[in-house]
Amino acid sequence: MEIQQARNEPVSFNATSAISTPNKVLGRRLLALALNLATVGGLIVAMGTVLATSGWTIPEVGMLIAFAVTLPWLSLGFWNAIIGFTIARFASDPAAYVTPAWRDARRPTPTVVPTALAMAIRNEDPAQAIARLEAMQRDLDGAGVKEWFAFHVLSDSSDPKICEKEKRLVNSWKARAASPSRIHYRRRSQNTGFKAGNIHDFCLRYGDQYDLFIPLDADSLMSAEAILRLVRCMQAHPEIGILQGLVVGAPTVSLFARVFQFGMRHGMRSYTLGSAWWQGDCGPYWGHNAAIRMKPFREHCRVPVIRGKPPLGGPVLSHDQVEAVLMRRAGYEVRVVAEDDESFEENPPSLPDFIKRDLRWCQGNMQYINLLGMPGLHGLGRVQLLLAILMYAGGAGWMLFMLFGLMQAFMPVGSEPYPTTLGLALFVGVVGMSLMPKVVGVLDTMVSDRRRALYGGARAVLTGSFVELLFAAVLAPVASLAVAIFIAGLAFGRRISWDAQHRVGHEVKWSEAATKLWPHVMLGLLTVVILTWQAPGALPWAMPLLVAFFMSIPFAVITSSPRLGRAVRRLGLNRTPEEIRPPSVLIAAGMATARPAPSIEGAPRTLADTVPLPSYESSST
């Protein structure tokens, strides 16, 4: 096997340290802590002043507590965006300023580290997944580094038809490849540990053959240059255990996905710059499209099984951040690079699919409650786990705030009215803080001629941002209520299964939308009735939530419409840079047009059904 032969060659590292001085990192973290504590404390005091005007009632105490739960994630997003925007505007090389090791990634250093690209799949469309992996293989071969890379399809599929098709596709791919020994297929008969268990099994089986590996989801795609930059950086900096780059949404005809990822596309850069500035060597890991050092990952990053039964016990669903804190506990850095770098994924194509994914992440993050006490974790690692919990607890907190407010409507009217001016200022301030990552993302794009041109000009940026703002005004409350209901259900054993996700068009029918979103409409109606009856003056304050709840069903149906999605695409609305100028690897994988993968050098369009299905004596080849 070529990769094994190359493995025996000597490997040299340029051990130029990427670690900022401890005092500098500590100072950044203390400043971030002070800014967030001051912000959270000030908002709690302001809300307490509003609510305590005529003394305290039980619902008002509940409102204050629920409001406090929402604030850490809100404040963190606000300050990350502000810090990141400042860095983006004044640093000559923003990504390297917060992650100094990234400078070595851009140098044309020869690749000398055996690396595996490992794609974990479970009951996915194998034609699409394997076409993406083959496109990456061809791109790397074209870059002249094929002897250093191998490709693994790690199947946890249980559907016999899908399993047979996976085997057929891989063998068809191997038949076309110049170096078929670098292509591997392994299927587990049991989905033990979900995706984390799948990856860990791969590390145990094949880890001795590689220094690095890059985990991929079924919808992942990376260009050769994006992969090589990660590998070059890891070569030069053996102190880094995980190097995570930005992952952006691939072009799509789904209206829901294209509007959602338009906002993420330009907003995440400033946010990630700000967070990476103070997180430093304790950065996040998002579970895919990252370079990982094999040996410490295999030895130290096995995700523990939590005692007790699901939903909060058993295997951890959200494995990525746990693996990050375990890597840091092992003495290796976890770094994130805040730079767009031809690393792609696909986002859910409809609101029900988005909520389903969100609830799975929510359940996984709530399991972190049982992991906060793991021995030996870096202090910031515990903070990362806590923030992951608060990310979902914050959304539920807004719904609790609303429910306590409805209860307060039945309380006797106090002797003093609520201070309208302070209440309005608080309302505007909270809304402004929640929008800040989007606002600075737009500003960062608009003030740069190059970035503005990538989106098709100023008008395209502003028009798309306005549409995305209206979109988010409905999506955020709807998703928050779904999370709140789900978290309440966790106490009664409710859990979500790990099924294959819809990657392409999922047209939502009215009946499906009504079945899944009727609680939103009912809560909206209940709120209107109670406030009209008991506190009509509060109706204008509740109007943003009410509009979102009443729009939830038509929103789900309309944003999943393939016809409307194609029309919006033709109009050029919410275009991302990759839709305007798609990289060659996107075209090769069939992701530039959001259609099934095209033929690759004579291969069939689905890469299947032309090679006879071979016989297998076991589930692993």
Image (cartoon, rainbow, N blue to C red):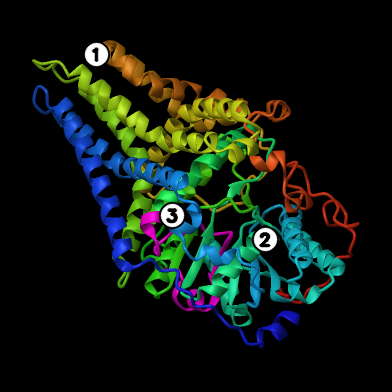
Left or right of 399? Residue 270 is right
> What is the CA distance from the residue labelled 2 to the residue labelled 3?
33 Å
Residues packed near mark 3 inside 10 Å, few (<14), some (14 to 19) or many (20 plus): many
Which residue is found at the position 25% from the left and 29% from the top?
404
Left or right of 475? Residue 162 is right
Which residue is found at the position 77% from the left and 67% from the top?
141
> Mark 1 or mark 2, which has the lower sequence index?
2
> Mark 1 or mark 3, which has the lower sequence index?
3
Residue 278 part of the magenta-drawn span: yes
Q: Provide the residue span drawn in magenta.
A: 276-304
SS class, disc 3: helix
Front-most of residues 549 and 618: 549
Horizontal and vertical percent position of residue 168: 81, 63
Res. 291 image quadrant: bottom right
Left or right of 62? Residue 141 is right
Labelled disc at residue 534: 1
SS class, disc 2: helix
Marks 3 and 2: in contact by CB < 8 Å?
Answer: no
Residues packed near mark 1 inside 10 Å, few (<14), some (14 to 19) or many (20 plus): some
Residue bearing the label numbered 3: 364
Residue bearing the label numbered 2: 225
Look at the image and tell me in which quarter the N terminus lies.
bottom right
**Residue 282 visible in rendering:** yes
In the rendered structure, which amino acid carries the disc numbered 3? Answer: Gly
| Front disc: 1 or 2 | 2
In the rendered structure, which amino acid carries the disc numbered 2? Answer: Glu
Horizontal and vertical percent position of residue 521: 45, 23
